[in-house]
Image (tube, rainbow, N blue to C red):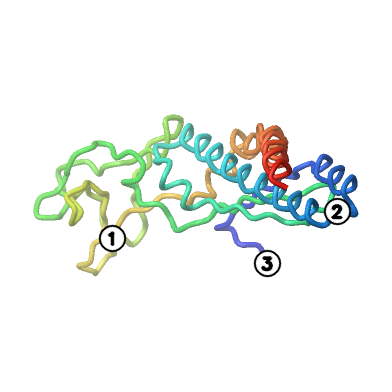
Amino acid sequence: MSDPNVMFLKFEFENTRGLELLSDFHNDVPIRHEIHQAIGSAIKRTGTYVNKHIARLIMDESYLKAGYIKKNLRLSVKGSHYDNYIFAIIRASGDPIPAHKFKLVPNRVTTRKQMQSKSWPAPSYKIGPKDKLRSGIEPGYSKPWIGLTSEGKKAMYHRQNGSSHRSYVVGPRINYFASFDRIFFHAFDGAQEVFEKRLEHEIDYRLKLS
């Protein structure tokens, strides 16, 4: 059963060059070992590029910082070095993102003694430049307010009805952005070219050492 809180982005690296080299040196075990190492290193470097590229795409759609995005993206590789295609999979998942990781409106404290004044309008937050204002109002919770964390940073809070414990107002998970067409269809732009260049670089480097 699929998890709605996880998004997978799949890409196939064409491994023609790697297979050609393995075929050319089919009787040379040490060189074949170096070729396998080169393919693995090229995939790893390409994965680093893809993660950074997706992070930039999400940054264009949101107010999230790159570091926060990257820690919620995971790259895994499926397939062997003998395949025509090597599958790379980006796994986008994580907990719901606190509203203050986006953009608070207004960007100031709206509380008196950690409670929202009834005479003040409830604050909102925006996920990204193209997104609408979101109230953060949820059934069963108090009207949100903007207060300070223990580190003195602004955050949007609310309380569950009948509770004295405040908690963060949260927005979507990171996989929310992976489903955007602008991200989904461009997540692996340039990845094949990066893979081929990294593979040639690794082959040149490793075979000269052999």
Question: Closer to the camera, 114 or 89?
Answer: 89
- Local SS, label 3: loop
Amino acid under label 3?
Met
Question: Closer to the camera, 138 or 109?
Answer: 109
Task: Give the quadrant of residue 138.
Answer: bottom left
Q: How many marks?
A: 3
Q: Is residue 202 above or below residue 114?
A: above
Instruction: Give the number of the mark in front: 3 or 2.
Output: 2
Amino acid under label 2?
Asp
- Local SS, label 2: loop
Q: Judge the density around disc 2: few (<14), some (14-19), many (≥20) Cα neighbours within 10 Å.
A: few
Q: Is residue 207 left or right of residue 83?
A: left
Residue 116 % position (x, y):
17, 50
Q: Which residue is mark 2?
A: 28
Residue 123 % position (x, y):
26, 42
Residue name at image x 43 percent, y 55 percent: 96
| Residue 1: mark in rendering | 3
Mark 2 or 1, nearer chain start: 2
Residue name at image x 34 percent, y 41 percent: 125
Q: Is residue 194 above or below residue 96?
A: above
- Local SS, label 1: strand
**Mark 3 vs 2: CB contact within 8 A:** no
Q: Quadrant of the N terminus?
A: bottom right
- Give the Cα separation between the discs numbered 3 and 2: 45 Å
Q: Judge the density around disc 1: few (<14), some (14-19), many (≥20) Cα neighbours within 10 Å.
A: some
Question: Closer to the camera, 81 or 121?
Answer: 81
Q: Judge the density around disc 3: few (<14), some (14-19), many (≥20) Cα neighbours within 10 Å.
A: few
Residue 64 % position (x, y):
40, 41
Residue name at image x 79 percent, y 41 percent: 14
- Give the Cα separation between the discs numbered 3 and 1: 31 Å
Q: Which residue is mark 1?
A: 167
Residue name at image x 42 percent, y 35 percent: 128
